[in-house]
């Protein structure tokens, strides 16, 4: 029951111990360690900051269920600011795993008290696409009450392994690694749209020529969705694609089109769009021949498909960046590599890095087993300015949660990051209780302070696309991304 990413990258088993490392202006801290019962393997899913100020996430194994090769079928967990880890739900507790199993990626919150996510397997019965159930889309509350919104059947997709994204129409968009009506017997994957009540529409089935096994999507200000496939395409190394809201997909770039895959091979994770309008991402392999199949790359691609390789990893600075990047408030991109670095011979335990838009890469942290191994999830920059992430392995070989502070200041973020005039917007932050003003790119807006971490507002008449500003007794806080006002 391994997903496509497990087929590409071999795992390293390590034993970890919590520790704190301080270097110059940055501080690395192991916050929590999983023990299997509360989860095992918080691998591909980024943490999410909830409206209550806690962090939430998923693990692909562990929990109360003893299915899934006796390793448990995954959990949904909460982590408080003081490091208290609580498993809120164990998957595959019902007969036949009809509640889903193995949530490969994290969840999203839409400004409510509920989260939305996917499981790669489970659901109902055998999946025609492969020897297991096809996976689910679920809704879950902060108390762990789970509702299944959709069970995939193979034809409409199988094996969702990417986070959902919310479109301007309020619906969710996502991808499945397998299934669909084209390509191989198992299917090459799909893109789908789903309403909040669970009505699902398959928008696209991938074929081999246009890519196989899609990663996650992002919604861009031009109204289109962009993403990558981890296989297929004209160069058999994956693709970058664009999809209109109605579903037509066009290929923007085919990886492994250069000799020895100097442009990269097998992109992993979602793209991120920077303020320059370009997209940034990573490939798991290619770039050079130092590692088997290449150590991987960081790339930039324009909206018309012009690609530039910004950095090629060589093992010492990381290897196999199997997941996407995050755009931080300093304008730089931050990410992790699953392997590489100088610890954990022969492959390395992984790294955390920063890279500028022009390709200057700085290795911020090299894992060495004592502080974690295998950081295979995207980083989260919380509103206190600190980065949070997970490692696949840790004490008891079950994984850890860590933080990395590099001296960036606090900010606010919105749910969602776009909306029409009059739309309700939730603003997340910290120390917000004394706020005295909210504005959208300079236009004042009505607001209500609900707690120290949440403000609600509506998009005011006359608002234009730009930063949201919150006035507090400690100074002004700006949103990490421009808020897009939809006309």
Image (cartoon, rainbow, N blue to C red):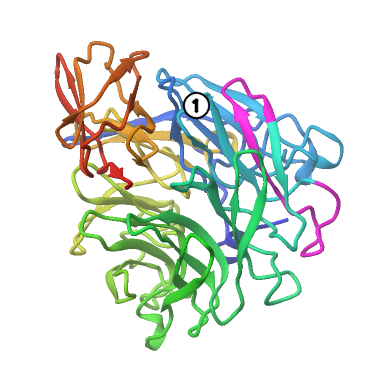
Direction from residue 422 to residue 444 in the image, left or right: left
Residue 392 higher or lower than 475, as above or below:
below
Nearest the camera: 421 or 409? 421
Residue depicted at 63% across the width and 53% down the height: 160
Q: Is residue 346 visible?
A: no
Nearest the camera: 293 or 242? 242
Direction from residue 120 to residue 385 in the image, left or right: left
Residue 161 higher or lower than 379, as above or below:
below
Q: Where does residue 454 sit, x and y in percent of width and height?
A: 36, 20
Number of on-image labels = 1
Direction from residue 382 to residue 121 in the image, left or right: right
Residue 33 higher or lower than 104, as above or below:
above
The N terminus is located in which quarter?
A: bottom right
Disc 1 target residue: 112
Please check the rendered image and state whether residue 316 is part of the magenta-colored stretch, yes or no: no
Direction from residue 429 to residue 80 in the image, left or right: right
Element under disc 1: loop
- Provide the residue span drawn in magenta: 124-146
Q: Where does residue 336 sit, x and y in percent of width and height?
A: 38, 51
Q: Where does residue 299 sit, x and y in percent of width and height?
A: 32, 67
Residue neighbourhood size for the residue with mark 1, other residues' Cα within 10 Å, grouped as few (<14), some (14–19), many (≥20): few
> Which residue is farthest top?
434
| Overall secondary structure of the magenta section | loop
Residue depicted at 50% across the width and 71% down the height: 249
Residue depicted at 85% across the width and 55% down the height: 126
Q: Where does residue 114 sit, x and y in percent of width and height?
A: 56, 28
Quarter location, residue 144: top right
Q: Is residue 304 visible?
A: yes
């Amino acid at each position: 029951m391994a997903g496509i990413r497990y087929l590409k990258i071999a795992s390293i088993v390590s034993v970890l111990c919590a520790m704190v490392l301080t270097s110059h202006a940055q501080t690395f801290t192991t916050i929590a360690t999983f023990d299997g019962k509360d989860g095992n393997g918080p691998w591909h899913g980024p943490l999410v900051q909830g409206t209550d100020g806690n962090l939430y996430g998923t693990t692909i194994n562990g929990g109360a269920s003893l299915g899934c090769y006796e390793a448990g079928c995954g959990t949904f967990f909460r982590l408080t600011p003081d490091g208290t880890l609580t498993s809120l739900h164990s998957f595959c507790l019902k007969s036949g795993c009809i509640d889903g199993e193995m949530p490969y990626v994290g969840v999203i919150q839409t400004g409510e008290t509920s989260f939305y996510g996917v499981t790669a397997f489970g659901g109902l019965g055998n999946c025609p696409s492969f020897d297991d159930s096809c996976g689910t889309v679920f809704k879950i509350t902060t108390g762990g009450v789970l509702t299944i919104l959709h069970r995939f059947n193979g034809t409409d997709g199988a094996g969702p392994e990417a986070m959902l994204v919310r479109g301007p129409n309020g619906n969710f968009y996502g991808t499945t690694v397998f299934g669909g009506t084209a390509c191989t017997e198992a299917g090459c994957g799909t893109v789908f749209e789903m309403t909040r009540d669970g009505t699902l529409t398959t928008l696209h089935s991938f074929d081999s020529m246009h890519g196989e096994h899609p990663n996650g999507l992002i919604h861009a200000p031009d109204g289109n969705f962009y993403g990558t496939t981890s296989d297929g395409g004209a160069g058999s190394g994956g693709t970058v694609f664009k999809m209109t809201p109605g579903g037509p997909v066009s290929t923007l770039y085919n990886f492994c089109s250069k000799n020895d895959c100097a442009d990269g091979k097998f992109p992993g994770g979602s793209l991120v769009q920077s303020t320059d309008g370009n997209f940034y991402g990573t490939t798991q392999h290619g770039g050079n021949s130092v590692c088997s199949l290449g150590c991987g790359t960081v790339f930039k691609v324009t909206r018309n498909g012009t690609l530039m390789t910004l950095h090629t990893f060589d093992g010492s600075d990381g290897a196999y960046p199997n997941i996407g990047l995050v755009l931080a408030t300093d304008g730089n991109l931050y990410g992790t590599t699953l392997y590489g670095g100088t610890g954990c011979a022969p492959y390395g335990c992984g790294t955390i890095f920063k890279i500028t838009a022009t390709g200057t890469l700085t290795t911020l942290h090299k894992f060495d087993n004592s502080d974690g191994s295998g950081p295979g999830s995207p980083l989260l920059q919380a509103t206190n300015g600190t980065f949070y992430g997970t490692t696949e392995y840790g004490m008891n070989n079950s994984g850890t949660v860590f933080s990395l502070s590099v001296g960036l200041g606090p900010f606010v973020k919105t749910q969602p990051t776009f909306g029409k005039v009059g739309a309700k917007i939730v603003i997340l932050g910290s120390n917000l209780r004394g706020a005295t003003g909210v504005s959208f790119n300079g236009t004042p807006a009505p607001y209500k302070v609900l707690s120290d971490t949440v403000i609600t507002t509506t998009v005011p008449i006359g608002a234009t696309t730009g930063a949201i500003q919150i006035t507090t007794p400690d100074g002004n806080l700006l949103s990490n991304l421009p808020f897009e006002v939809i006309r």
